[in-house]
Image: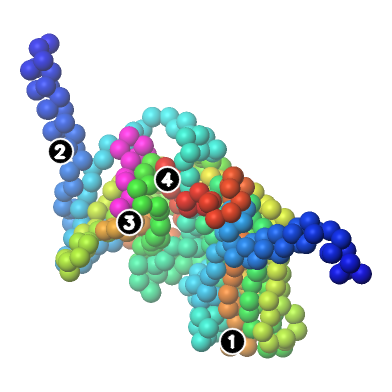
Amino acid sequence: MTFQIIQCKPNAVLFAAVLALGAAQAEAGVLYGTDYDSYNGRSGRPTDSLLSLGRDGNFGAYCQSGASSGRRTVVYPFDIKNGYEIFSVRVWGFDEATSNDLSYEMVQSCQPFLSGGAPVRTVLATAASSGSPGEFSEYLYLDQHVATSSTCAYFLEARFAPDNSACAGFDLRSVRVRVLSNNPDVIFRNGFAPWGS
Amino acid sequence: MSTRLKAIVMAVGCLATSAALADRPATQDERLAAGFEDPSMSLMIRDLPLPAGPDSRAPDGGSGDEWLTRIGTAFQGRTGDFNFGGQAPSIACTSGSERFASANFDLPAGAAIKYVDLFAYDNSSSENMLVFLISVCQGTADADPPVSTILAQSATNATPGDTLVTLNLSATPIIVDRYSCRYMVRVNMASPGGTCVGGSIFLDKVRIQYTP
């Protein structure tokens, strides 16, 4: 049946080919001003100097702290230009811990533009590993959230354990983070995107 | 005014401006305040005129300006002795005397740095937070030692609580030279006493406004 339709409507074949090519290009990051930024797990910044971090062979981070005082989170700050749309964050990790899971919060932190003010944190999306699956990957969907980088900062916060609690060590690792954003002002929806977009 | 006199006046004006923008070696007090104790490190000071008038910037960028922000958590201690903590994006210097932290700002080549904004909390009656915009430049092919230059600096004052400190470079923007230089912001979280005050002083973020 499908073969007949394609034979009868050559335009449909062309349309399907264009769609397929477009999908491939979107994966490569050249359509629609798309930006991909990837971060090694170990590039995360600890939120507390009491947090003891280790690095696995894939540049992933794991928490070595036992039950002692201090936060158990690392932060991945993102440089997202003003007006860009944040599509999603994908995380990769390793969880063979029966006691702990690795949870993530994508945070927007805003302050007044030209005056002092306490940071206002808004959690835009969350995800977490579950059980002890070994390698895992989770997706945080941000629904084309428009960045206001003049007043806000954006970062992903990964938690290895409740604050002041024991971490799971090498059994729980944050390996990679990738943020996908989009420049909505790109005119040429191909490789002729403006420099720096 | 004769043409010759105008030329002389302009020349004198140019010389005066050049003199004002010339870098000079930092004094010992300035070195200590910025965390450059090592006398073998070259540290210069640029005494840029910083306008103190009202700030009328708009958050939409207006003239095409962009922003690059480093949250407090992204600042790295000068040494491993820097004790810090806090809920992201903010950090406090929790204890000890190592009070310096820095963050790199990777700006596009040729960008013009116009403003550096420090967002902080200061409720300490004894200490303030100092903020420095620093370039570290080095010969492009030689093995010359790097030269650090404090391009602008300021500080929190008294006990304002949540506060904003601005380095207004809009009259004489810093043009980014990625080929030879790196750019960073350093904070001193306990000045002048030198001992960290925990949750009495927080670094929330530093934002640079620039023209690409």
Query: Where is B187 relative to B3, above or below?
Result: below
Instruction: Determine the secondary structure under disc 4.
Output: loop
Disc 2 residue type (three-letter): Ala
Q: B204 or A94: which is nearer to us?
A: A94
Colouring convention used in this rendered image of the protein? rainbow
Disc 1 residue type (three-letter): Gly
How many other residues sit within 10 Å of disc 4, few (<14), some (14-19) or many (≥20)?
Answer: some
How many other residues sit within 10 Å of disc 2, few (<14), some (14-19) or many (≥20)?
Answer: few
1 and 3 marks on the same chain: no
Predominant SS along the magenta part: loop
Q: Which residue is disc 1 drawn over?
A: A169
Chain letter belonging to callout 1: A
Front position among marks 2 and 1:
2
Instruction: Please tell me which residue is depicted at 64% across the width and 72% down the height of the picture.
Output: A91
Instruction: Determine the secondary structure under disc 1.
Output: helix
Q: Which residue is disc 2 drawn over?
A: B19
Q: B125 or A191: which is nearer to us?
A: A191
Chain letter belonging to callout 3: B
The magenta-colored residue range is: B168-177
- Are the residues flagged by discs 4 and 2 in contact, CB closer than 8 Å? no
Residue B32 % position (x, y): 25, 59
Instruction: Please tell me which residue is depicted at 54% across the width and 38% down the height of the picture.
Output: B59
Q: Is residue A104 visible?
A: yes
